[in-house]
Image (cartoon, rainbow, N blue to C red):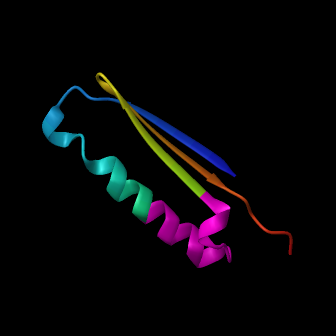
């Protein structure tokens, strides 16, 4: 599974929610799929006024 969220930062005071979103996404996914930390790759990139959160999860075969 691959999830990419891009966000244009227009209000610098509201730009810190992506790390919290990352933690919450991983917590929810872990409730439904048995994954290890090695199977989850998270990348948060900030460029000028754009933030991109990329979450890649290797879901094991049942």
The magenta segment is 24-40
| Residue drawn where x is 42% and y is 64% of the image | 24
Q: Is residue 44 left or right of residue 33?
A: left
Depth check: give the residue in front, 44 or 4.
44
In the rendered image, the vertical position of residue 56 relative to residue 8, given as above or below: below
Q: Is residue 52 left or right of residue 17?
A: right
In the rendered image, the vertical position of residue 32 relative to residue 9, given as above or below: below
Is 32 inside the magenta-drawn segment? yes
Measuring from the top left, give residue 43's x and y in whole percent: 49, 45
Quarter holding the C terminus is bottom right
Q: Residue furthest right?
A: 62
| Residue drawn where x is 13% and y is 39% of the image | 13
In the rendered image, the vertical position of residue 5 relative to residue 42, given as above or below: above
Measuring from the top left, give residue 4's x and y in whole percent: 55, 40
Instruction: Examine the image and state in which quarter residue 61 appears.
Output: bottom right
Decide whether the magenta segment is chiefly helix, strand or loop. helix
């Amino acid at each position: 599974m691959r999830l990419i969220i891009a966000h244009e930062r227009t209000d610098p005071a509201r730009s810190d929610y992506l790390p919290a979103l990352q933690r919450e996404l991983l917590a929810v996914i872990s409730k439904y799929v048995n994954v290890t930390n090695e199977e989850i790759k998270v990348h948060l990139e900030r460029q000028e006024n754009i933030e991109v959160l990329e979450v890649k999860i290797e879901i094991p075969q049942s």
